[in-house]
């Protein structure tokens, strides 16, 4: 079923309002893209593909103080990874057009140069119930505003000394229409324009002009821009004579306990809380990529949550589910022990080994099988043995037996216990005639995974939790940082781990080798909805 934006597009195509659909994704290059941007990318790209149009990637590079070429490159990389194809544009390429539009407004008496302080401007703006107050310079002579604006352009005015404001309506019920600033002075080197410009347009002024220059037909924004649409239309009505784009708003993506502000994400990076913008704990697309998420899973997530007109919050489990469903179908299975405990078989001689056969994917016979050798010394998960087990503990324990995955049932014999009470080694004996696949004379309720100590591969496994703890009344996100958001394990895995990048570590989760560090496997997603279970 078509969403409300698709219904609008289909009507526009049917009645001839437009003949080709042009959408755009307009990020500011002041940080890395996060998962919230994925919805906008997928929506705008999907609309263009569905209706045979195109989607422009346009950088809103109108603030030289915050922007950087690193961010430009990361954004291009991310949107291509998500499936975008098209042309790259830069708002800075239209600075001359925007400047001419501003001069046009001044000449028409619809813009003026003002020099009141930001504090006074805020005081005079009014409230939702009270109109604003006009600046003393609102009726400044046109020639004087033109001269001052040229001074701003020529670098003869310092930062913050003068601004150019649109002359609209200080009594408007929409505060955005109360003579908004459309140009300010910024003496900073632009990442593409260098020192050519000293005046820079504000987003609300630049955005509609950018759309118009590029021939955008449907300018799709998130709901926070709904109140800005009258200003978007005003700029076009007074500055543009050709075909005008129209703005439509949809609900942005909000995910529970996930930071969706580039300002806060930058703070985490700058303060060293995380290891960079692509830290796998970060909700950036680069972070998700390092963690092992795929573009197809993220696109599926965006499809599932749909396009709505009302803001809402989705659970992390919905995103996890999309990734888990995909990896459940594609990821080969191997055994890996994250917290190793040595297991010694007492009724086999030194040097003994015996091959077992294991399915590469139990639901996909076509994936084949592999052989792996059991040995006298193996590693099992420390949590799979207990001297004082709780009720219904079906793993290895005193007076108990357990099956080693694909191999024999083993029965507890003894263990080495250190002075601090920790177990250093466990001893067990094989129950004869119990090799997996045969008619076993005894049964075991539990099955545990293992690796052969003589040929296992040493790997680093990393598990992740939320960056933020529950709010519990705290409003400052720095007070909610989770000290246990990352746990590193010195693990052992089957040698088969060296032959691939993505695996299900049996009974553990789905892990992907870090693209930056060979031998480091990041947990992409758990075997079940672990995040919501931790709430």
Image: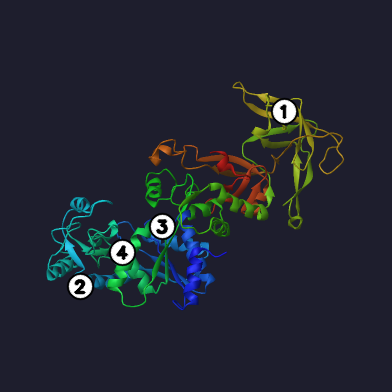
Q: Secondary structure at mark 2?
A: loop
Image position of 337 with respect to 227: above or below = above
Tag 1: Cα neighbours inside 10 Å, few (<14), some, or many (≥20)? many
Residue corresponding to mark 4: 231
Q: Position of residue 259 (x, y in %)?
A: 44, 47
Q: Secondary structure at mark 1?
A: loop
Q: Secondary structure at mark 4?
A: helix
Q: Is residue 166 left or right of residue 348?
A: left
Q: Is residue 303 left or right of residue 64?
A: right
Tag 2: Cα neighbours inside 10 Å, few (<14), some, or many (≥20)? few
Look at discs 1 and 3 and give the one toward the viewer.
3
Circles 1 and 2: CB atoms closer than 8 Å: no
Residue corresponding to mark 3: 223
Q: Position of residue 534 (x, y in %)?
A: 55, 38
- Distance from the alpha carbon under mark 2 to that under mark 3: 32 Å
What colour scheme has been applied to the protein in the rendered image?
rainbow
Residue corresponding to mark 1: 397
């Amino acid at each position: 079923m078509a969403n409300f934006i698709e219904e609008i597009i289909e009507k526009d195509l049917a009645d001839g309002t437009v003949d080709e659909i042009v959408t755009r994704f307009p990020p500011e290059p002041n940080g890395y893209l996060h998962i919230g941007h994925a919805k906008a990318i997928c929506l705008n790209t999907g609309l263009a593909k569905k209706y045979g149009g195109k989607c422009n990637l346009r950088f809103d590079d109108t603030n030289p103080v915050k922007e950087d070429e690193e961010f430009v490159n990361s954004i291009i990389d991310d949107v291509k990874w998500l499936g975008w194809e098209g042309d790259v544009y830069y708002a800075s390429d239209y600075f001359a057009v925007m400047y001419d539009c501003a001069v046009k407004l001044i000449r028409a008496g619809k813009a003026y140069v003002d020099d009141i302080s930001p504090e006074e401007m805020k005081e005079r703006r009014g409230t939702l119930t009270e109109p604003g107050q006009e600046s003393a310079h609102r009726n400044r002579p046109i020639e004087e505003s033109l001269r001052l604006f040229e001074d701003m352009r020529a670098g003869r005015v310092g930062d913050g000394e003068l601004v150019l404001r649109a002359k609209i309506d200080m009594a408007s019920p929409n505060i955005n229409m109360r003579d908004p600033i459309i140009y300010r002075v910024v003496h900073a080197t632009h990442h593409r324009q260098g020192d050519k410009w000293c005046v820079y347009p504000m987003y609300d002024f630049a955005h509609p002009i950018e759309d118009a220059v590029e021939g955008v037909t449907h300018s799709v924004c998130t709901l926070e821009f709904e109140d800005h649409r009258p200003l978007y239309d005003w700029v076009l009505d007074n500055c543009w004579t050709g075909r005008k784009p129209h703005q439509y708003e949809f609900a942005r993506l909000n995910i529970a306990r996930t930071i969706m502000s580039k300002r806060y994400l930058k703070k985490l990076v700058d303060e060293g809380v995380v290891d960079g913008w692509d830290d796998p704990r970060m909700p950036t697309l680069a972070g998700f990529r390092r963690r092992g998420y795929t573009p197809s899973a993220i696109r599926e997530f965006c499809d599932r949550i749909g396009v709505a007109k009302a803001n809402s919050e989705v659970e992390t489990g919905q995103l996890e589910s999309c990734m888990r469903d995909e990896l459940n179908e594609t990821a080969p299975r191997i055994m890996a022990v994250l917290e190793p405990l040595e297991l010694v078989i007492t009724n086999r001689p030194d040097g003994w080994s015996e091959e077992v056969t294991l399915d590469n994917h139990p639901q996909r016979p076509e994936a084949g099988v592999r052989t792996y050798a059991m040995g006298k010394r193996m590693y099992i998960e420390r949590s799979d043995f207990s001297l004082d087990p709780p009720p219904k503990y079906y793993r290895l324990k005193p007076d108990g037996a357990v099956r080693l995955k694909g191999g024999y049932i083993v029965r507890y014999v003894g263990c080495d216990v250190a002075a601090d009470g920790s177990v250093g080694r466990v001893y067990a004996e094989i129950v004869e005639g119990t090799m997996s696949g045969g008619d076993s004379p005894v049964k075991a309720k539990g099955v545990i995974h293992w690796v052969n100590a003589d040929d296992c591969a040493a790997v680093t496994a990393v598990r992740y939790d939320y960056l933020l703890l529950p709010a519990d009344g705290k409003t400052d996100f720095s007070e909610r940082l989770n000290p246990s958001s990352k746990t590193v394990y010195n693990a052992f895995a089957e040698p088969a781990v060296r032959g691939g990048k993505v695996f299900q570590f049996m009974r553990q989760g789905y892990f992907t080798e870090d693209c930056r560090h060979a031998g480091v496997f990041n947990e992409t997603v758990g075997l079940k909805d672990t995040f919501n279970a931790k709430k």
